[in-house]
Amino acid sequence: LVLDNFEQVRPAATQVAALLAACPGLAVLVTSRALLHVAGEQTFPVSPLALAAAGAGSAEGFDDPLLTTVAAAAAVQLFIARPGGRTSIRS
């Protein structure tokens, strides 16, 4: 069971604990932008993806240099490459 942005529904931790108790084979992965301070919590800090400096990058097909830079950034390329994602920043 994957629960993303769990800080938004922190009171549901009681129900998650009940599910874990009732289902011995259940594994739960919870993501949060803040520490939840719950039993079994393990933290893995994740840094944001870098944004290229202005003028860097090699995305083609854009007249605006800033848009070219943004399109070449790793964070943008991740979203473009995801399954079902767009093939270009314009589509």
Image: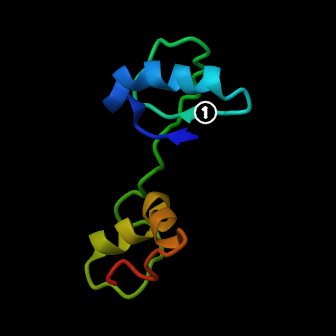
Tag 1's secondary structure? loop
User: Looking at the rendering, in which quadrant would you find the N terminus?
Assistant: top right
Furthest toward the right, the residue is 25
Q: Which of 36 and 20 is in front in this view?
A: 20
Q: Position of residue 27 (x, y in %)?
A: 67, 33
Going by the numbered disc 1, the residue's amino acid type is: Val
**Residue at the spot x=34%, y=84% of the render?**
91
Q: Which of 91 and 15 is in front in this view?
A: 15
Report the side of 48 relative to 65 (left or right).
right
- Splitting the image into 4 quarters, where does residue 13 fall? top left
Q: Name the residue under label 1.
A: 28
Q: Position of residue 82 (x, y in %)?
A: 53, 68
Say if 75 sits above or below 32 in the image.
below
How crowded pointer 1 is (Cα within 10 Å; few <14, some 14-19, many 20+) is rated as few
**Residue at the spot x=45%, y=62% of the render?**
73
Furthest toward the left, the residue is 64
Say if 21 sits above or below 59 in the image.
above
